[in-house]
């Protein structure tokens, strides 16, 4: 069972990540150690060539990592990205983006996560990201 619900994570987006809320980013599902986030398509996301921009894809992937981490540790908002790597594989079509993230390893202070980002309706990933999150000591926030 997940330590945070879709509703709780979407409230974090609304209340604490206003940039993500403003562009419509939200969680579709959160399970124990995994999350799926959606970013509805908007024309402002396009770069020359008619594909969705890299920074847009990176933002979605990082938020998905955050959701996957919180799915195990609960609502610890001060968990933060300490490293992030992304490989852009194919151009992202002008449709909604879906990010599917999963925890690879969870330790006391660090979590390692991977995310595949897809254009909705397209099976192959447009990007693959990995990252590490730092988890604050329990005494700081719970």
Image (cartoon, rainbow, N blue to C red):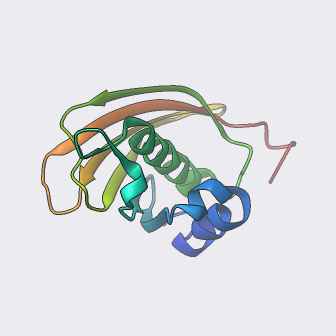
Instruction: Tell me which residue sits at (59%, 63%) in the image.
Output: 22
- Residue 39 falls left or right of residue 136: left
Q: Residue at x 52, y 61 (%)?
A: 23
In the rendered image, which quarter contains the C terminus?
bottom right
Determine whether 76 is above or below 58 in the image: below
Residue 103: x percent and y percent?
A: 43, 42
Question: Which of the 4 image quadrants contains residue 129?
Answer: top left
| In the rendered image, the vertical position of residue 134 relative to residue 20, given as above or below | above
Tally of numbered discs: 0
Q: Which residue shows up at 55% across the image and 53% down it?
A: 72
Instruction: Name the residue at the front extreme.
Output: 48
From the viewer's side, name the closer residue of 119 and 52.
52
Q: Is residue 14 left or right of residue 120?
A: right
Where does residue 130 sit, x and y in percent of width and height?
40, 31
Q: Is residue 3 visible?
A: no
Depth check: give the residue in front, 138 or 119.
119
> How far across and down, in percent of the image, does residue 139 sit?
87, 43
Residue drawn at x 21%, y 52% as measured from the top left:
93
- Of 18 and 30, which appears nearest the observer? 18
Q: Is residue 58 left or right of residue 122?
A: right
List the single residue furthest toward the left: 123
Q: Is residue 92 visible?
A: yes
Out of 57 and 7, give the one closest to the viewer: 57
x%, y% of residue 38? 39, 62
């Amino acid at each position: 069972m997940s330590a945070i619900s879709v509703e709780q994570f979407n409230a974090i987006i609304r209340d604490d990540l206003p940039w993500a809320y403003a562009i419509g980013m939200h969680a579709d599902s959160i399970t124990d150690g995994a999350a799926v986030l959606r970013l509805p398509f908007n024309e402002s996301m396009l770069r020359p060539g008619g594909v969705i921009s890299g920074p847009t894809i990176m933002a979605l992937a990082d938020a998905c990592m955050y959701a996957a981490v919180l799915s195990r540790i609960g609502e610890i908002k001060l968990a933060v990205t300490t490293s992030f790597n992304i490989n852009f594989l194919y151009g992202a079509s002008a449709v909604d983006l879906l990010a599917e993230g999963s925890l690879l390893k969870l330790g006391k202070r660090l979590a390692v996560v991977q995310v595949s980002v897809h254009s909705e309706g397209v099976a192959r990933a447009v990007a693959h990201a990995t990252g590490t999150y730092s988890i604050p000591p329990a005494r700081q926030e719970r």
